[in-house]
Amino acid sequence: MIEEATVDCYNESEQVTGWFTMIEEKLAVPFETMVLGVSVTVEGVDLNKADQIVAICSRGRDRQRLPILDLPLPSPPPEGADWIEAYRHWLS
């Protein structure tokens, strides 16, 4: 997975973009999860200006971006969540 996400990348910024692309393509959204005891819907993922992959979470009309590595996944996790775990492994 690491090789697939980072192929043809020349620097860390490009590698994060590669990870973002794979997570965006593979993660089945929307899905429900709990954040700080509140049920939210994960609508998708985005890449912020700091080259951080974030989950776009909503509850009613409220929206918040949460770092994907801080996102608690439901049990069972959504299809494609293994890409988040591979990204976590790559960062460590």
Image (cartoon, rainbow, N blue to C red):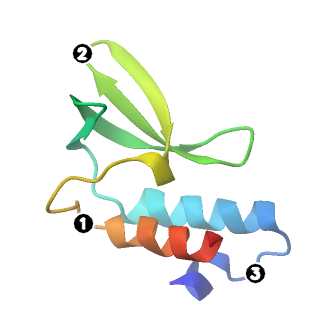
Of 31 and 73, nearer the camera is 73
- Secondary structure of residue under mark 3: loop
Residue appearing at x 25%, y 34% in the figure: 41
The residue labelled by disc 2 is 60
Q: Residues within 10 Å of mark 1 (few under 14, many from 20)?
A: few
- Secondary structure of residue under mark 2: loop
Of 73 and 26, nearer the camera is 73
Label 1 amino acid? Glu
Q: Position of residue 47 (x, y in %)?
A: 61, 45
Label 3 amino acid? Asp
Establish if 41 lies above or below 53: above
Label 2 amino acid? Gly
Of labels 2 and 1, earlier in sequence is 2
The residue labelled by disc 1 is 79
The extreme bottom residue here reads: 3
Residue appearing at x 62%, y 73% in the figure: 92
Establish if 39 lies above or below 12: above
Q: Position of residue 20 (x, y in %)?
A: 56, 58
- Secondary structure of residue under mark 1: loop
Establish if 84 lies above or below 2: above
The extreme left residue here reads: 76
In space, the residues marked 2 and 1 are separated at their CA atoms by 24 Å
In space, the residues marked 3 and 1 are separated at their CA atoms by 26 Å
Of labels 3 and 1, earlier in sequence is 3
In space, the residues marked 2 and 3 are separated at their CA atoms by 40 Å
Q: Where is residue 46 in the image (x, y as percent from the top left)?
A: 54, 43
The residue labelled by disc 3 is 8
- Horizontal arrangement in the rendering, residue 39 relative to residue 50 (left or right): left
The extreme front residue here reads: 36
Of 78 and 34, nearer the camera is 34
